[in-house]
Image (cartoon, grey):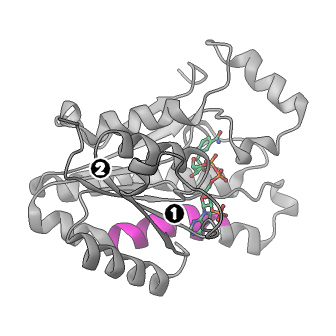
């Protein structure tokens, strides 16, 4: 008996980085997982190594900034699976710059992907959870949504927005037994953080009490906890997973 046998999960941005680790963790515990992503693996790319696990994953191409694309993906997912139990709003981008140099396009791209994307995906899938009176929504925010970061006004605004979104939905959906929480990762080793300079990396490491960068699996484990029955009395919370960087 696995913790997520019979459960259907959607993970946005599920084909790489933290999203892929979340997809793999759910597959390992018996779920059927829909990885929604902008760039999907080509037919000759192996997305999930294990052949048995691969049978329980579907990849759907989506642009989370487009309501049309999100609704189409939701329709495909629900037509095939009959329901969605758990949504992980993980897709996210950065377009860093100081405010005086930040273009309107960079502001819009980050807010549309990170914040509006979560709104559109939630709106498209929450009805399925409401009908069955059981659901979990987990939003991947960031510690910079709590403490800010120079050069990331757009990104930190979008991640702070996700925290407000999480708390409002937690209040709105509690009566339907839909729990809504956020995770605020610190510094996690993915393509997103590869862009940082050695100097920036050193600075982060110096300030992390656990003295190591996080791995995508560190986030995936906490997502699974919040999605599990062990977390059935937790809603509207933001859990920092950052090696102690923010406390
Ligand atoms: P990656 O850049 O590795 O992955 C982000 C994923 O989101 C990619 O698969 C990307 O797709 C997808 N995505 C971006 N735009 C869209 C879109 N319009 N529609 C659908 N999918 C899209 O980043 P991480 O794995 O590091 O980040 C995952 C989440 O964790 C993000 O929300 C990020 O903000 C958050 N986070 C990460 C931290 C870190 O240290 N890494 C720290 C704090 C928070 P594609 O590859 O096709 O572009």
Secondary structure mostly seen in magenta is helix
Mark 2 Cα-neighbour bin, 10 Å: few <14, some 14–19, many ≥20: many
Q: Where is residue 151 in the image (x, y as percent from the top left)?
A: 79, 48
Neighbor class of circle 1 (other Cα within 10 Å; few <14, some 14-19, many 20+) is many
Mark 2 or mark 1: which comes first in sequence? 2
Residue bearing mark 1 = 115
Residue 179, position as x, y percentages in the image: 23, 48
Q: Give the range drawn in magenta.
A: 110-123
> Going by the picture, which residue comes out furthest to the front?
51
Q: Residue 31 carries which label?
A: 2
In the figure, 184 relative to 63: above or below? above
Residue at point 48%, 45% (across, down): 50
Question: How many numbered marks appear?
Answer: 2
Percent position of residue 176, x then y: 11, 58
Q: Residue at x 83, y 23 (%)?
A: 202
**Toward which corner of the image does residue 204 lie, by quadrant?**
top right
Q: In this view, does 216 lie to the left or right of 118?
A: right
> How far across and down, in percent of the image, does residue 161 sit?
49, 56
Most foreground residue, 43 or 29:
43
Mark 2: which secondary structure? loop
Q: Determine if the magenta segment contains residue 122.
A: yes
The residue under the point 81% across, 63% down is: 102
**Looking at the rendering, which quadrant does residue 57 occupy?**
bottom left
Camera-side residue of 200 and 2: 2
């Amino acid at each position: 008996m696995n913790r997520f046998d019979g459960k259907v999960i959607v993970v946005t941005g599920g084909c790489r980085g933290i999203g892929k680790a979340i997809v793999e963790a759910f597959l390992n515990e018996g779920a059927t997982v829909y990885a929604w992503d902008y760039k999907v693996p080509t037919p000759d790319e192996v997305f999930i190594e294990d052949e048995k696990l691969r049978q329980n994953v579907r990849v759907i191409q989506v642009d989370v900034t487009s309501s049309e694309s999100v609704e189409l993906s939701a329709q495909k997912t629900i037509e095939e699976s009959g329901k969605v139990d758990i949504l992980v709003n993980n897709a996210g981008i950065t377009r860093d710059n100081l405010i005086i140099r930040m273009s309107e396009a960079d502001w819009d791209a980050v807010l549309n992907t990170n914040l509006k994307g979560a709104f559109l995906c939630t709106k498209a899938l929450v009805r399925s959870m409401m009908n069955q009176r059981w659901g979990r929504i987990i939003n991947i925010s960031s510690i910079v949504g709590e403490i800010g970061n120079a050069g990331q006004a757009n990104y930190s605004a979008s991640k702070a927005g996700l925290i407000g979104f999480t708390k409002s939905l937690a209040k709105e959906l509690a009566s339907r037994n839909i729990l809504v929480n956020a995770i605020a990762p610190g510094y996690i080793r993915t393509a997103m953080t590869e862009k940082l300079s050695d100097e920036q990396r050193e600075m982060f490491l110096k300030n992390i009490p656990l003295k190591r960068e996080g791995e995508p699996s560190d986030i995936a484990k906490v997502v699974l906890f919040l999605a599990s029955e062990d977390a059935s009395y937790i809603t509207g919370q933001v859990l920092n997973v950052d090696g102690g960087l923010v406390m």
